[in-house]
Image: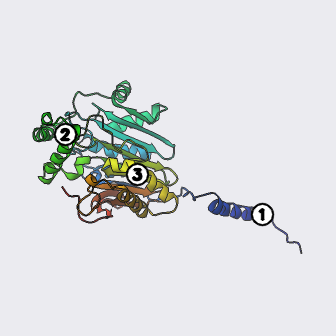
Amino acid sequence: MATNVTRRQFFIAGATAGAAAAAFGQGPTVIRRSPAKPVVVSSANGNRFKNGGDMTGVEKAWSLIAQGSDVLDAVIAGVNIVELDPLDDSVGYGGLPNAEGIVQLDSSCMHGPRKRAGAVASIEGVRTPSLVAKAVMDYTDHHLLVGRGAQEFARNMGFKIEDDLNTANSREKWLEWKRRTDPSHYLDPKTRAEAGYRVALQMVAEGKIDREHLYGTINCDGVSPRGEICGVTTTSGLAWKIPGRVGDSPILGAGLYVDGDVGAAGSTGRGEANLYNLCSFVIVDNMRRGMHPKDAAMDALRRVKANTIEKRLLNTSGNPNFGLNFYVVNAAGEYAGASMYPSHYAVCTEHGAQTLETEALLQGKPEG
């Protein structure tokens, strides 16, 4: 007996069949944008430094998002506070310099709705590399400019170029590191590098350097009430690094990754470990497949742990002897902070800014 099907029933049936085909025949399901809880997530220094003002980085970013500002403009305004604050010697002005005493900065940014990105690496003389990274995104067809070329681009875009971004604090710490290592006594580059890192750890143990500032960095990611997602990462990089060394911060998929339909992830800590595993991309891809931000980040940390096999990178327990933190948010406004060892992260919602404990893969702390 024939069944009469109305036009409405026909389209509902077709839509249902299409959804089923997408779920079972065409790979992972993409999380669709929907109304979200506005939130800003960052590394802990995003809720510590104020550069003489009355708002921290996450507070500034959230307030701008709440006022309807573009999310990327908001999170960059947040990290600008930290970049410009001389009290944070892991980012921007006054960041700990390289082995030659020169401050070299890296940054990247990604705009989820526009599917655009920009980055700079080893740039000198500009206090706010995050803004230069955004200019790369806005005014070029490129994703990454480096070194002198990045500086010349910044100059042409009207950024002030300074001869030296050291503060009295960063220069004093560099001189102390230089005095202890005395590189002229070491002709072998490998020995020089080992000695430099050993002295840096000694200075951490003595409280002369914040352990979190040995690698530096601030990552900040935000979601608007409309589910728009953007992120930025900016750093002065590894303290006393070989000139020209670039870590994970300006590399898309490592120090930062944003998918406007899924979420964002960024990192601080040992950049080389993150670069090898491209963890920010892995985390966002995990969320694409339905993982909660915390689970997505913990999976990436387990990957790093499994891939860390060099003896020099392991502690006496055979675990990674370094810190690595991830800051994650999805399109629904759910967030998490995860780390190799116990640490902290910052978040700001309609309830205000908080500094929270991360979910840690391992207990204790790196040896050194």
- Secondary structure at numbered mark 1: helix
Q: Distance of mark 3 from mark 1, alpha carbons? A: 47 Å
User: Which residue is rendered at x = 22% and y = 47% of the image?
Assistant: 214
Reading the chain from its start, which is encountered first: label 2 or label 3?
A: 2
Front disc: 1 or 2? 2
Residue placed under numbered mark 2 in the picture: 192
Q: Earlier in the sequence, mark 1 or mark 2?
A: 1
**Toward the viewer: 33 or 216?**
216
Q: Which residue is mark 1?
A: 10
Kind of residue indicated by mark 1: Phe
Residue pictured at 30% horizontal, 57% vertical? 345
* Tag 2–tag 3 contact (CB < 8 Å): no
- Indicate the amino acid at tag 3: Asn
Query: Which mark lies nearer to you, 2 or 3?
Result: 2
Determine if residue 5 is in view: yes
Q: Which mark is residue 177?
A: none
Q: Residues within 10 Å of mark 2 (few under 14, many from 20)?
A: some
Residue topped by disc 3: 277
Is residue 86 something one can see in this rendering? no
| x then y, percent, for residue 221 | 39, 51
- Earlier residue among tags 3 and 1: 1
Kindly identify the amino acid type of the residue bearing the numbered disc 2. Arg
Observer-side mark, 3 or 1, equals 3
Report the quarter where the C terminus lies: bottom left
> Image height check: is 238 above or below 156?
below
